[in-house]
Image: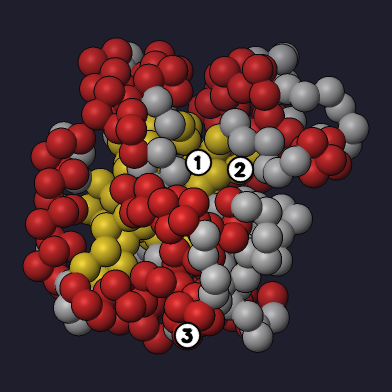
Amino acid sequence: MNLGILEQMPTPKGKTAEDIVEETLSFGQYAEQLGYERFWFAEHHATKGMASSSPEIMMAALASRTTRLHVGSGGILLPQYSAYKVASQLLQLQALFPGRIEAGVGRSPGGGERVRSALADGKENQLNAYPEKLEALAGYVRGQSPQGVRATPRTEAAPPVYSLGLGENSAEIAARLGIGYVYGHFIDPSRGEAAHEVYRQQFTLGSLTAPHALTAVFVICGESDAHAEKLATSQDMWLLRTEKGLDSRVPTVEEAKAAKKTERDQQKIRENRRRMIIGGPDTVREQLSYLTERYHNDKWLILTNIHDVNEKRRSFERIISLF
């Protein structure tokens, strides 16, 4: 089992952005000590509840504090940016930390239309241009010249490029370009089997010589199933409020339990649990092993967005000890 971490830098109430940055870097160092393979940073904007808006900067900061850990982005919002500029940033990171940079990109707008427009400096929506931009990015990173110019610095090896997605279409694009693929089970678990199958079956040689897929999933591993359920109430309420456009800071367990919930809220929480693995060590081992067999993929990116940073660390300690 190959285990990594996808960090959205969730912000508990009462914590500043400065607090979260320092806690995250410390956590990344600890993840390396525990034996995690990779540590990726998400990109989110215009939210109080997630402090990771510039994955490239966080990658550099964590790489400078670690020696073995692969650091990556999960993912840079490619449609809003120049493929050439993104490639140049990734190659600069590769030059600083050879062999430890992983480039995950996605087609998300990054928020509402005003956020998307601000990120793209007022340019028209280019979400539909994602396949072309992804192909250009992969070319620039490999040292090609898609528009007659090469991205610099020209490193000896190229950082691997991964495309994030939620179904067969995104898997087909990654397979056709011969790059890595990340399936977001933590967003939508319904297309996982089909997406992984398409990626494996349609993969052609490109930047990679063989398919390399990762699966991202929420996991909370408690001392027992009951303990994990208690911790999960914090994540349940955070996710519910985030999806409703409300205060997206992570609540305490006590606040989450006391919050008023409509029947529709309760139903949504139950639906969201399909995106998660919640339980004690035996339950987590069983469910993660089941998904590994179902997806024919044993490479994971794990998210845990709960209020208590110490409980979060202990959850990751338990998870890696299982495998």
Q: Earlier in the sequence, mark 3 or mark 2?
A: 2
Q: Which residue is mark 1?
A: 104
Element on which disc 3 rests: helix
Tag 1: residue type? Gly
CB under 8 Å between discs 3 and 2: no
- The answer to whether one can see residue 205 in this image is no
- Residue 198 horizontal side relative to residue 149, left or right: left
Asked if labels 3 and 1 touch by Cβ distance under 8 angstroms, the answer is no
* Left or right of 191, for residue 58: right
Name the quadrant of the C terminus: bottom left
- How far is mark 3 from mark 2, CA to CA? 34 Å
Contact? badges 2 and 1 (CB < 8 Å): yes
Report crowding for label 1: few under 14, some 14 to 19, many 20 or more residues within 10 A (C-alpha).
Answer: many
Q: Residue at x 22, y 77 (%)?
A: 226
Q: Nearer the viewer, mark 1 or mark 3?
A: 3
Give the residue at the far front of this rendering: 263
Q: Residue at x 36, y 42 (%)?
A: 185
- Local packing at callout 3 (Cα closer than 10 Å; few below 14, some 14-19, many 20+) is few
Q: Along the horizontal axis of the image, is 272 left or right of 132?
A: left
User: Residue 144 is drawn in which quadrant?
Assistant: top right
Residue 72, percent from left and from top:
49, 51
Q: Position of residue 56 (x, y in %)?
A: 62, 53
The residue labelled by disc 2 is 76
Residue at label 3? 254
Q: Where residue 135 sits in the image (x, y, percent)?
A: 56, 19
Q: Which residue is more in the foreground, 232 or 122?
A: 232
Mark closest to the chain's N terminus, 1 or 3: 1
- Mark 2 residue type: Ile
Q: What is the three-letter code of the residue carrying label 3? A: Glu
Asked if residue 15 is positioned above or below residue 40 in the image, the reply reads: below
Which residue is at 75% across, 55% downward? 46
